Image (spheres, grey):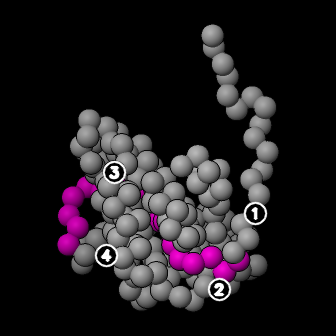
Amino acid sequence: MLNLIKTRRSVRKYLDKPVPEDLLAQVCEAGTYAATGHGLQSPRIVAITRPDLVKRLSRMNAEILMEQHPQLREKNPGLDPFYGAPAVILVLADRACRTYLYDGSLVMGNLMLAAHALGLGTCWIHRAKEEFNSEEGRAILRDLGIEGDYEGIGHCIIGYPADTQLPAPRPRKDDYVVWVK
C-alpha cells in the first residue's frame, strides 16, 4: 500500500482504449470503502463510460475553466479538461451531511489508489461543484435518476495511461511533518 501511495501520479494523456467494466467496478467498490463521517456514506459514485456524456461533462468543465481563466480561451480553443480519458467516475456528496466534502474527498483518494493498483491512470479534475450547481448539471443528475441536494466533489478521470513511464515524485518538503514528542 505504501508503494502505491508513493508511486501514484496524475495522468494527463490516455490511450483510446475503454476501461473494462470489471476493473471500473473494482475501482468504484474501493471508493465505497472510504471512511465517512459517522459511517453515513454520504457520497454517491457515478461511473460514466458513455462517450457522449463524458464529452458533455468535459465541455461543461471546459466552459467553467474558461470563465475562471479567460486567458486560456485563445491558447486552447479545443481544450479537453478530461485529457481524452475514456471514463469518468463522478463523486457527489450529500450536502445535508456535515462531513460531505471530506467524505467525498476520501472517496476520490480511494478511487485513484485502486485504479493505480489495477494499472490504470487517473487524475482528479475539479469544477464538479460548479458543473452540478448549474441547471444543465442538475438536469443531468435528474436524467440519471439521482435526486437530492448533492454537491459535485470531483471527477476522477480514468483510463490506460498513454505513457507507461510515470514521473518520479517531487522531493517532499522538509517541514511537511512536524513531530511533537
Residue to which mark 2 is pinned: 78
For marks 1 and 2, the one nearer the N-term is 2
Query: Could you tell whether 91 is left or right of 138 in the image?
Result: right
Q: Nearer the viewer, mark 2 or mark 3?
A: 3
Q: Which residues are magenta?
A: 145-163
Labels 3 & 1 near each other (Cβ < 8 A): no
Q: Does dot 2 land on a helix, a strand or a loop?
A: loop
What is the distance, in whole Å, between disc 1 and disc 2 at their CAs? 26 Å
Residue located at (45% from left, 54% from top): 110
Residue type pointed to by label 1: Pro
Residue located at (70% from left, 32% from top): 176
How busy is the neighbourhood of tag 2: few (under 14 within 10 Å), some, or many (20 plus)?
few
Residue 181 % position (x, y): 63, 10
Q: Does dot 3 land on a helix, a strand or a loop?
A: loop
For marks 2 and 3, the one nearer the N-term is 3
Q: Does dot 1 land on a helix, a strand or a loop?
A: loop
Residue type pointed to by label 4: Ile
What is the distance, in whole Å, between disc 3 and disc 4 at their CAs? 26 Å
What is the distance, in whole Å, between disc 2 and disc 3 at their CAs? 37 Å
Name the disc covering residue 167, or none: 1
Q: Nearer the viewer, mark 3 or mark 4?
A: 3
For marks 3 and 1, the one nearer the N-term is 3
Q: Nearer the viewer, residue 68 or 16?
A: 16
- Tell me if residue 105 comes above or below residue 129 in the rendering: above
Residue to which mark 3 is pinned: 33
Residue 122 % position (x, y): 55, 67
Name the disc covering residue 150, or none: none
Residue type pointed to by label 2: Gly
Residue 92 % position (x, y): 35, 58
Query: Could you tell whether 146 is left or right of 85 in the image?
Result: left
Residue 14 visible within the image: yes
| Quarter location, residue 84 | bottom right
